[in-house]
Image: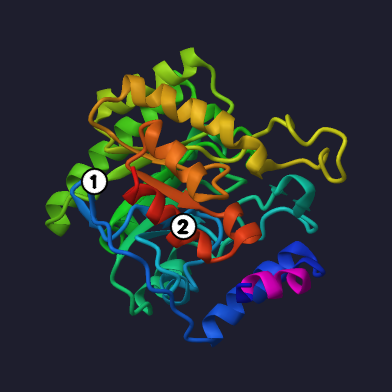
Amino acid sequence: MSLYRLARPLLFSLDPETAHKATLRLLDAFSFSRAIPSHPVHAMGLDFPNPVGLAAGLDKDAAHIDALARLGFGFIEVGTVTPRPQRGNPRPRLFRIAAKEAIINRFGFNNVGIDAFLANVARTRWRGVLGINIGKNADTPAERAADDYAVCLEKAYASASYITINVSSPNTENLRRLQDKHPLDALLARLVALRARLADRHGKRVPLVLKVAPDLQQDEIQSIADSVLRHGVEGLIATNTSISRQGVEGLRHANEAGGLSGAPIRERSTRVLRGFAAVLPGKTLIGTGGILSGGDAAEKFAAGASLVQLYTGLIYRGPGLVSECVSAYRAK
């Protein structure tokens, strides 16, 4: 039995957000590391030692990168970060639905703000592939959302291996409207133009990745794909959390506001991933959503993902899930 399986009942006896923070502190305190089989993947001009990464949201402030890197991830994504610090939504805001291996969160982009966030990144010793996930402050008007993304892109550019544009969290009011055709076109046009100037200034071209929702219909998938192709965005993450409650109906906490993640959204996320794979030839697709086994990761790879990311699966399965998913890619 793994150490995590022994520790999980204690962690699950705690409030979920308290357990989340306690786990990160334990990882910081102990020099625990895992040997992960090497399986290099080249994508977006970057070399990944293996195709299994950590999804944004677990380390919102980039404060635990070194500890998380020891778990063997091929890449780590931190954030979501906003220009100014914000508390996020009131607690409680994280809920387990253990019977379905699911989580509902309504954190609301709680983070220390871009300046303190980058100070944390600067203290990190690990030098692997680092994604920085950017968003807007909750009190920034929708018509000025692009200003927030531009501030974060410019400040984070030098520190990032790639930058993810998060327009799909359900926990910031009206954020998902940025996935609509005209707002998305305007946002991507501005950020890609800014990226061109930053590439000249810094002497490197940092890939841009768009993170989308699992609740998209086919016409929305096509519209987003058209924008990605039109503006030359290098990658897409499918998907964020879901506003649907399919698969958890009637269970405790199922009616809490927020985004649903974990096993119940696996099929929905994979459907969206497969839809983008059909209309984004040559683009790097990162599959996330409902990966709780190597078989789930293999499903994402088969659907068109070059890389995958974990979050909720780690809560239910522990660090051993990383090597299991790497092995699933090796067996592809």
Q: Which residue is mark 1?
A: 43
Number of numbered discs: 2
Q: Quadrant of the C terminus?
A: top left
Q: Earlier in the sequence, mark 1 or mark 2?
A: 1
| Image quadrant where residue 76 sits | bottom left
As measured in the structure, the alpha-carbon distance from the residue carrying label 1 to the one carrying label 2 is 21 Å
| Image quadrant where residue 129 sits | bottom left
Q: In the drawing, does residue 72 fall left or right of residue 95?
A: left
The image position of residue 147, as x and y in percent, is 42, 43
The image position of residue 330, as x and y in percent, is 32, 51
* The residue stretch that appears in magenta: 4-11
The image position of residue 122, as x and y in percent, is 35, 75
In the rendered structure, does residue 9 fall within the stretch colored magenta?
yes
Q: In the drawing, does residue 88 fall left or right of residue 288?
A: right
Q: Is residue 86 visible?
A: no
Label 2: which secondary element: helix
- The front one of 48 and 44 is 48
The residue shown at (31%, 43%) is 208
Give the residue type at disc 1. Answer: Ala
Q: Which residue is mark 2?
A: 324
Q: In the drawing, does residue 237 fall left or right of residue 242?
A: left
The reply to whether discs 1 and 2 touch (Cβ–Cβ < 8 Å) is: no
The image position of residue 241, as x and y in percent, is 60, 40
Q: Would you place residue 305 above or below residue 223 in this image?
A: below
Packing grade of label 1 (10 A; few <14, some 14-19, many >=20) is some
Label 1: which secondary element: strand
Give the residue type at disc 2. Answer: Glu
Q: Which mark is residue 260?
A: none
